[in-house]
Image (cartoon, rainbow, N blue to C red):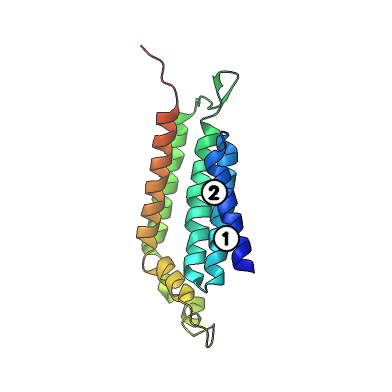
Amino acid sequence: MLFYLFATLAILSAAYMVLTRNLLYAGFSLLVTLLSVAGIYVLLYADFVAVTQLMVYVGGVLVLILFGIMLSSRVHDKSVLSESVNKVWGVVVTGFILVGLSYTILNANISALPWLQAAGTDVLGQQKSTVQRVGIKLMTDFVVPFELASLLLLIALIGAAYIATDKPKV
């Protein structure tokens, strides 16, 4: 019964997303579609895929799309993007934060934390799930590639916002 509910919800919201002319409504119907697909994954006992669906697509890609839609909107033929006077201070503060976080991540001995050592035991018992092991590996051994991927996504968002703005023709 729940499978049919999620499937119907996914199909209807996907159809609305394709047929609507309002980009913001299309983005929110994409949200309903992605959440319905995550519900179907949960019903199929694919817990890692469901969590990945929520974190990557709903939490990352959809938020990126909605920010792109909202930042590229115009109000009375004027851009909603503001001009910043403090660009130099922004670059300096960002540089300090980047250096501080990089130093902390590279010099931290995360795998020696006591709660992480206790997490090596099987918390879930007889259930077959890979979420715990994948999460621990992602946040300990693969934290630098994870952060580099997030930095790459941030650079892509900034580039897309820059391309979306109208540049005055000289």
The C terminus - image quarter? top left
Q: How many marks?
A: 2
Q: Which residue is mark 1?
A: 7
Determine whether, in the image, residue 138 is placed left or right of residue 27.
Answer: left
Q: Is residue 141 above or below residue 68?
A: below
List x then y, in percent, for residue 56.
47, 56
| Foreground pick, 4 / 147 | 4
> Crowding near pointer 2: few (<14 within 10 Å), some, many (20+)?
some
Going from N to C along the chain, the mark reached first, 1 or 2, is 1
Which residue is painted at 40% across and 30% down in the image?
A: 163
Q: Is residue 83 above or below residue 17?
A: above
> Crowding near pointer 1: few (<14 within 10 Å), some, many (20+)?
some
| Furthest residue in direction top, as rendered | 170
Q: Quadrant of residue 123?
A: bottom right
| Foreground pick, 132 / 147 | 132
Determine whether, in the image, residue 79 is placed left or right of residue 139.
Answer: right
Q: CA distance from mark 1 to mark 2?
A: 10 Å
Determine whether, in the image, residue 148 is placed left or right of residue 58.
Answer: left
Which residue is painted at 45% across and 76% down in the image?
A: 130
Is there any visible trace of residue 150 in the rendered image?
Answer: yes
Q: Amino acid at mark 1?
A: Ala
Which residue is painted at 52% across and 74% down in the image?
A: 45
List x then y, in percent, for residue 135.
46, 70
List x then y, in percent, for residue 66.
54, 41
Which numbered marker is on residue 38?
Answer: none
Q: Which residue is mark 2?
A: 14
Q: Amino acid at mark 2?
A: Ala
| Foreground pick, 34 / 81 | 34
